[in-house]
Amino acid sequence: MATVPGDPVITVFRSRLRPEAQAEYESMAQRMLELASAMPGFVELKTFVADDGERVSLVTFADAASHAAWRDHPEHRIAQRLGRDRFYASFDISVCRPERVRRFPE
């Protein structure tokens, strides 16, 4: 079992898009990826789409301070509001810190 380097923060964002919002959402998502990846402490963003349309994004920051800076970034705040108002039919967010990390091969 590996120890967790630093104190990473992982956001698990599960969502369902409104069908009519797809094009506008894609543009905003691309901008948010560009912005997030330029933030200090950004580690990675991975998004997966299930056959039933549910999307799961895993966003990792190196620590709580860099995660909070991203959460509170003014442009990201605008995107969050647009998500609630226009893009998402539903979503839920879980913010997590890993207890253990296992890797194969190590």
Image (cartoon, grey):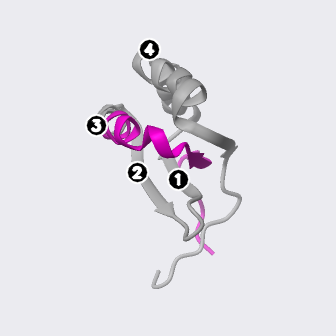
Disc 2 from disc 3: Cα separation:
11 Å
Residue 98 percent coordinates (x, y): 66, 56
Residue 105 percent coordinates (x, y): 45, 85
Q: Pointer 2: what residue?
A: 44
The residue carrying pointer 1 sits among few (fewer than 14), some (14 to 19) or many (20 or more) residues within 10 Å by Cα, namely some
Specify start and end residues of the magenta stretch as a single range. Answer: 1-30
The residue carrying pointer 4 sits among few (fewer than 14), some (14 to 19) or many (20 or more) residues within 10 Å by Cα, namely few
Mark before the other along the chain sequence, 2 or 3: 3
| Left or right relative to 57: residue 93 | right
Residue type at mark 3? Glu
Residue 74 lies in quadrant: top left
Contact (CB < 8 A) between labels 1 and 3? no
Q: Pointer 3: what residue?
A: 34
Contact (CB < 8 A) between labels 2 and 1? yes
Residue type at mark 4? Pro
Disc 2 from disc 1: Cα separation:
8 Å
Disc 2 from disc 4: Cα separation:
20 Å
**2 vs 1, front mark:** 1
Q: Pointer 4: what residue?
A: 74
Q: Pointer 1: what residue?
A: 58
Mark before the other along the chain sequence, 1 or 3: 3
Extreme front residue here? 20
Q: Secondary structure at mark 2?
A: strand
Q: Nearer the viewer, residue 75 or 10?
A: 75
Mark before the other along the chain sequence, 2 or 4: 2
Q: Secondary structure at mark 4?
A: helix
Whether 93 is drawn above or below 14: the answer is above
Q: Quadrant of the N terminus?
A: bottom right
Extreme bottom residue here? 105
